[in-house]
Each structure stands twice: as C-alpha cells, then as structure tokens.
Amino acid sequence: MKRLFTNARLVLSDHIAEGSLLVDGDTIAAVGTVEAPSDAETVDVGGLLLAPAIVDLGVFAMDKAAMRAGGIARIGLMPDQSPILDGPGIIQRASAMGKPELWVHPIAAATAGLEGKDLGEMAINAEAGARAVATGRRWIADSGMMRKVLAYARDCGLAVIAHAEDAGLTGNAVATSGETATRLGLPAAPAIAEALAIARDLMLAEETGAQLHFRNVTTAGGFDLIRAAKRAGMPVTCGITPAHLLLSDVAMTDFRTFAHLSPPLRSEADRQAALRALGEGTIDVIGSGHDPRGPEEKRLPFADASPGMAGAETLLALSLGLVRDEVLTIERLFALLAANPARILGLSTGTLEVGHPADLILVNADAPWQIQADRMAAKAGNTPFDGLPVQGKTVALFKGGTEVL
C-alpha cells in the first residue's frame, strides 16, 4: 500500500519544509516535491506538522494507550521491571509485547538483578534484542564493577545508560537539600550527589572508551561535567524530562506526591542551568520518564510514596512549550525526541529520511487542551502538571505506515 501525505509542514533534520511525503509499505519512499503515484492514497494534512514519531528513551512502563496518545512509536524500556530485564527470554518477551503498534526496545540490566554485584549477560541479551544496558534507578557504588560494565558494554557495542546519584550521599533522601526540603522536614541530599556520580563515571568511560548516556541530568554541576566531556570528544550524552526543565523543588511545597520524582526536583538555579544546557546543545534527549503509579503508591506521606510520574501523554505538549518560549527550534526538538534517542539505541529511525521506517506523527502544534490527571489514558495519572493548560496535540500516529491513533 502507498500513501502520499500532501500539504504538510515536514520536520526535517535541519529545517521545516512545505511539501509531501510518500510511504510505500512500511517505509518512507520520498520526501519533498513528490509526484503522486497512480496507486497511492492521497492524504491532505492541511498544513499540519508531519514529524518523526517519538522514540521515548528510558521509560519504566510499557503503557500502550499512553504512548499512542503521546505520539510515541518506540520506547527504550528500562530494566526495572518485574521480572528484571536480565535474561534473554525476558528480553525477547519484552521486545514482542507491544507490537505491532508500539515497538519496545528492551534495555538490559547492566548487572544481574540490578544489584551491582555481578555483570549481566550482555552479549546474550544483545542477541535476544537488548539495545543498551542500564543501571536502572540505582547507582553502582563499586567502581571496579562499573568499570567492568563499561568495558564489557563497549566490547558488545552497547551504550551504558547510567543513573547519576551517589548513593553514599542520597541514602533515603526524597528531596534536594535546600529551603524547601528544610521547611517540609523531608529527608534530603545535596545536589552535588549528581555531579559526584557523573564525575566518576566519566573518568571510567574515558578510560574504557565506552559509550555512556546519563538518563537524567538535572544540576548545574552535572551539566558542567557533561559539557567538558563533550568538548574533550568523549562519546557521552545526557537526557532530561520536562518536569526537571519546567519545575523546581517549590512544586513539592504542599507535600504533593505527584512531584516526588527520581532524581528529585532541584533548585530554581539548577532549573535555569538546565534550560541553558538545553538551548546550547549539552542535553541530547528529552524523555517522558513515564512511570505511572496508582493511589496505593502515591496517596502516602511524601517520604513514603514511590517516585515517578506519568509523562508519556504530556511529553510532546510540554516540549512544544519550549519551542514557543524560543529555548529551541522545532527541528531541534524532534532531534531530542526522536533522532538522538534512536541513535543511542542503534536504531535507523527518528528522522524523515528515505528508507527509514514510516514512523510518523501529525501534530497540531497550536491545539489547546488541559492536562487532567483523572482523564489520562495512562495506567495512572500521577502527573505534576495536573490542571495545566497546554498547546500541541498528536492528531495521528503511524507505526510502519499503519495508522494506530
């Protein structure tokens, strides 16, 4: 089957172009000025944005309804599952469970059971479909073990996705040290815990030559280290969520557990540093951090509640706000949402290039709506943005040329 999208604003890698896009089967066949084949279905999109579907790197739940609503066609699934993604059979099952409308790319546990003691079976898991390895929500305290993880992953051709918080400092902390945590009486850890973890892992990555991605960098000190590593030519990347770009720790003031995240929300100074890092290109990925938690885990005292947020449905709209605020361009945004996550996972997708899979979204960037936790498609609506009016909505989602939304 062939389908020709006409009258589209095409989000290309370096600019927006008005034109058409031809899909032949499950592949992009032509982009730009395209002569309509006689056997193609023609779809006039009325000037909407036609962009690569989102590749959401670092989610904690396979939530098909939420992903469809958010324009997400592929996810990099973190190993923190039940059971943990640390064996080939589990990897294979995870890879198959979302198809055909959502492709799950499992990220295998870097160590057995995510316990930080024994190396995971990286080569076998890679053969089973793992696209990277990760430390999960945890930090590997043993530097010798982390060095082995990086060296083994390098030999397997896999990126290591690391959690950046020194556990010796964070302990049972649920907030960042500062005025807000003090006023609320919450267990807190200094923001430097992130920079300490990053500094050690960067030194080990430089020594081993491994590809290293920090899933969530949120502090000025952390960005300084990433910036310097990139200047030195190291293969290091980092991500962030909209929550850490748009909210500071003040959002926790009413003890609202929807603002209990991992890593915790930071100071306003760190949030401003994150926006600067985003604008200058230090940050490579914006991910949803999708981790839906029901009332049994959120309707608890703040320190006892589970961290996490339902972020898939709001990822695009919140990110488009950064474009309207002129923090970044629309084409740069889709590099952060699609092209860069795909590259880290070793996937040939994430751009509107001929020969790539026809994973596409039609976006009305100006469509107004309100985030409402109790109406979300996600398994749970624990969003810190409940009640916020936003603009930008996925009108249609195509996975491999087939419409799934």
Image (cartoon, grey):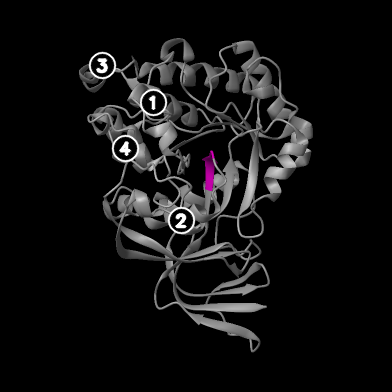
> Closer to us: mark 2 or mark 1?
2
**Secondary structure under badge 1?**
helix
Q: Residue furthest front?
A: 296
Q: Position of residue 194 (x, y in %)?
A: 42, 21
Bounds of the magenta span?
56-60
On screen, residue 355 above or below 264:
below
Q: Are marks 4 and 2 in contact (CB under 8 Å)?
A: no
The residue labelled by disc 3 is 185
Amino acid type shown at disc 4: Arg
Q: Look at 58% across and 22% down and name the residue there.
A: 206
Residue 276 is tagged as 4
The 10 Å Cα crowd at callout 1, few under 14, some 14 to 19, many 20 or more, is some
Q: CA distance from mark 2 to mark 1?
A: 32 Å
Q: Earlier in the sequence, mark 2 or mark 3?
A: 2
Q: Position of residue 115 (x, y in %)?
A: 63, 18
Residue 400: quadrant of the picture: bottom right
Main secondary structure of the magenta stretch? strand
Amino acid type shown at disc 3: Gly
Q: CA distance from mark 4 to mark 3?
A: 31 Å
Residue 70 is tagged as 2
Residue 11 is tagged as none
The 10 Å Cα crowd at callout 4, few under 14, some 14 to 19, many 20 or more, is some
> Closer to us: mark 4 or mark 2?
2
The residue labelled by disc 1 is 224
